[in-house]
């Protein structure tokens, strides 16, 4: 095994530096990548540098640590082993319980050197028996994701599912708003600050984040296939696997194809 | 409408005891008749009257919180119950003894009997009425006290949020080793912050300068934690330093700016707190602004505030109203450069000289 690498994601600069110092003392061979201070940077850097260990603070600006782990799992290439995850938190007791089973370890801040030593041993053991990301890795991450508040699986369908969506016509710059019947919607896809609402031959935009829209959708009809994509299950025409092993969906009435993230690939396994 | 069997029994036993006392009094003044006579009359009149009131009150006014019908309905019920109770109770007692009081009694005797029933009925009715009333008052006072205690606890919970405390301590632990002088300063701020938070409710007022010093404690702690992500300025004109304000009035606004404004923002931002005065006619108004360059409010954030959110602002509004009366306002607007601007306005009692 080459020199192991680690990425620290922690928004408080002093704590980040201290963790780096303590880690260096506890595991001199570990090579530390430059620290990042928010969840989105953690995902970006982790994808680019593919560290062996990822220390994630739970509370971070933008995307929090748990969401970052889930996002990373979605985009992680199939041929590389998934990093060992260590979460750090000052207090979030519930989070500790939720991810205890899924993460290699978790750290309570302030980090005690003796406790960190134990973490290092656990990570080393985990790295030794590690193989390219397997289904079970994603199985674990999926349950982690489900434990997050606001995740698709953690809520049941609202008592009264949404029936109409006021949405502006794409390209109209918000000047034309239409009441789009939910029955006509084939897919929702997150795009920057907007959510694209796709129907046969037409496209609309809404500002509601997908996370807030999900609880109002009938999850029997709409399936989440990626953290940014929800499609109408009835409309799925074919599911293909491309060369890199990625699943692609084709929907009736749309030319676009939609990528299925690994976390949701189990939905399309042939019976 | 619900019947509490035990309470009904308790009421009836009290009425019975009262009836026995009345008849004992009658026997004392008219020992010629056997005790049984006034006792049976008293008990049967009392029982009928009590039953009408006990079971009728729920029909007459089921929503009364004292258990007694409100206003004229209460009086009407009592008067009606006493009249019916007298007639029916007398008849029952007559049947018991096998004679008729209506024919046998002289006018004088009838009047005395009426009067005794009327006075006795009024006394016991008033007794029950005032008991129900004072029990209700005690219950309300109790509830108000509980609500006040809950609000205080909630405020403490927000201010002494474990996440904030443990992160502060984690930072402190590092500074002790790397920068003892800064650690000392940080500890001083923490001590002052804790002292103000834990003992804040003991004084009703403190000077605006103290208020700003507490904000500085909190912001200094947050600045150590957030590093480059937090910049802040506190502007307090010298002339306004002594203006009295309720302690930690502004704290929730600054906390909101950090928690909902800057913390979710990757690049952090800036918080400005400033105090000034403005004149409208004869009245000078104090104006305090808390401005941040955070992510800003989502439209409708105030109205749809989930439990916990919006608590800070609501609490500030309530304290403003209590301290300065109607007319004092708090206003939250989306800042033109992004972020949120909270403005407090309240009348200033002794405005500083205009030279300042």
Image (cartoon, rainbow, N blue to C red):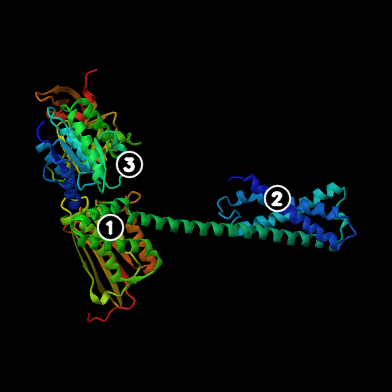
The answer to whether residue A35 of the structure is visible from this angle is yes
What residue is shown at x 70% (from left), y 50% (from top)? B12
Mark 1 or 2: the one toward you: 1
Q: Quadrant of residue B327?
A: bottom left
Identify the secondary structure beneath mark 1. Answer: helix
In the picture, the quarter occupied by the C terminus of chain B is bottom left
Q: Is residue A4 left or right of residue B103?
A: left
Instruction: Please rate how many residues cluster around mark 1, counting C-alpha atoms within 10 Å: few if below 14, some from 14 to 19, many from 20.
Output: some
Task: State the residue in front, A234 or B218.
Answer: B218
Res A94 label: 3
Residue B351, percent from left and from top: 30, 78
Q: CA distance from mark 1 to mark 3?
A: 23 Å
Residue B5, percent from left and from top: 64, 44
Tag 1 and tag 3 share a subunit? no
The answer to whether residue B55 of the structure is visible from this angle is no
Q: CA distance from mark 1 to mark 2?
A: 58 Å
Q: CA distance from mark 2 to mark 3?
A: 54 Å
Q: Tell which subunit mark 1 falls on.
A: B
What residue is pinned by disc 1? B255
Task: State the residue in front, B176 or B290.
Answer: B176
Res A161 label: none
Identify the secondary structure beneath mark 3. Answer: helix
Identify the secondary structure beneath mark 2. Answer: helix
Q: Tell which subunit mark 3 falls on.
A: A
Instruction: Please rate how many residues cluster around mark 2, counting C-alpha atoms within 10 Å: few if below 14, some from 14 to 19, many from 20.
Output: some
């Amino acid at each position: 095994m080459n020199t192991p690498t680690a990425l620290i994601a922690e928004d408080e600069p002093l704590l980040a530096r201290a963790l780096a110092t303590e880690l260096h003392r506890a595991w001199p061979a570990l090579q530390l990548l430059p620290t990042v201070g928010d969840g989105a940077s953690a995902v970006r850097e982790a994808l680019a540098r593919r560290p062996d260990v990822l220390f994630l603070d739970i509370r971070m600006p933008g995307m929090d640590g748990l969401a970052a782990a889930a996002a990373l799992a979605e985009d992680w290439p199939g041929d590389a082993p998934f990093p060992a995850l260590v979460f750090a938190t000052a207090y979030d007791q519930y989070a500790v319980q939720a991810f205890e089973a899924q993460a290699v370890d978790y750290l309570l801040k302030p980090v005690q050197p003796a406790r960190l030593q134990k973490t290092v041993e656990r990570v080393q053991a985990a790295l030794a028996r590690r193989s390219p990301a397997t289904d079970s890795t994603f199985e674990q991450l999926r349950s982690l994701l489900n434990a997050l508040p606001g995740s698709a699986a953690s809520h049941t369908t609202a008592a009264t599912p949404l029936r109409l969506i006021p949405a502006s016509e794409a390209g109209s710059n918000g000047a034309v708003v239409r009441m789009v019947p939910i029955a006509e919607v084939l897919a929702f896809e997150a795009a920057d600050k907007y959510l694209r609402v796709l129907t046969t031959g037409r496209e609309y935009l809404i500002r509601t984040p997908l996370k807030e829209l999900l609880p109002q959708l009938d999850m029997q009809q709409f399936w989440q296939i990626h953290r940014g994509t929800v499609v109408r299950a009835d409309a799925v025409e074919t599911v293909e696997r491309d060369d890199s092993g990625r699943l692609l969906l084709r929907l009736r009435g749309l030319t676009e194809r939609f990528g299925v993230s690994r976390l949701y690939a189990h939905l399309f396994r042939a019976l | 409408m619900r019947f509490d069997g035990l309470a009904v029994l308790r009421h009836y036993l009290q009425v019975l005891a009262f009836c026995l006392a009345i008849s004992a009094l009658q026997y004392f003044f008219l020992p010629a008749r056997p005790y049984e006579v006034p006792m049976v009359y008293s008990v049967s009149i009392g029982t009928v009257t009590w039953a009408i009131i006990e079971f009728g009150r729920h029909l007459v006014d089921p929503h009364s919180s004292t258990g007694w019908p409100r206003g004229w309905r209460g009086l009407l019920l009592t008067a009606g119950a006493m009249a019916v109770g007298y007639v029916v109770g007398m008849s029952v007692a007559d049947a018991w003894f096998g004679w008729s009081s209506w024919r046998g009694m002289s006018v004088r005797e009838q009047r005395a009997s009426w009067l005794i029933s009327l006075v006795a009925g009024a006394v016991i009715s008033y007794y029950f009425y005032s008991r129900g009333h004072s029990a209700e008052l005690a219950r309300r006072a109790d509830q108000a006290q509980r609500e006040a205690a809950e609000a205080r606890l909630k405020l403490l919970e927000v201010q002494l949020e474990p996440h904030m405390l443990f992160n502060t301590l984690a930072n402190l632990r590092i500074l002790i080793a790397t920068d003892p002088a800064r650690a000392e300063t940080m500890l001083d701020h923490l001590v002052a912050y804790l002292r103000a938070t834990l003992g804040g409710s003991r004084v009703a007022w403190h000077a605006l300068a103290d208020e700003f010093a507490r904000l500085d404690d909190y912001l200094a702690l947050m600045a150590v934690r957030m590093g480059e992500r937090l910049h802040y300025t506190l502007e307090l004109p010298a002339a306004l330093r002594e203006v009295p304000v309720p302690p930690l009035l502004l704290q929730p606004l600054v906390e909101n700016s950090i928690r909902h404004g800057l913390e979710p923002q990757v690049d952090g931002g800036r918080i400005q707190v400033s105090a000034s005065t403005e004149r409208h006619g004869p009245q000078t108004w104090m104006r305090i602004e808390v401005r941040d360059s955070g992510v800003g409010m989502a439209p409708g954030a105030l109205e749809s505030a989930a439990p916990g959110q919006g608590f800070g602002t609501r609490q500030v509004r309530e304290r403003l109203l209590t301290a300065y009366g109607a007319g004092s306002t708090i206003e939250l607007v989306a800042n033109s450069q992004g972020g949120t601007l909270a403005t407090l306005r309240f009348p200033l009692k002794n405005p500083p000289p205009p030279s300042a």
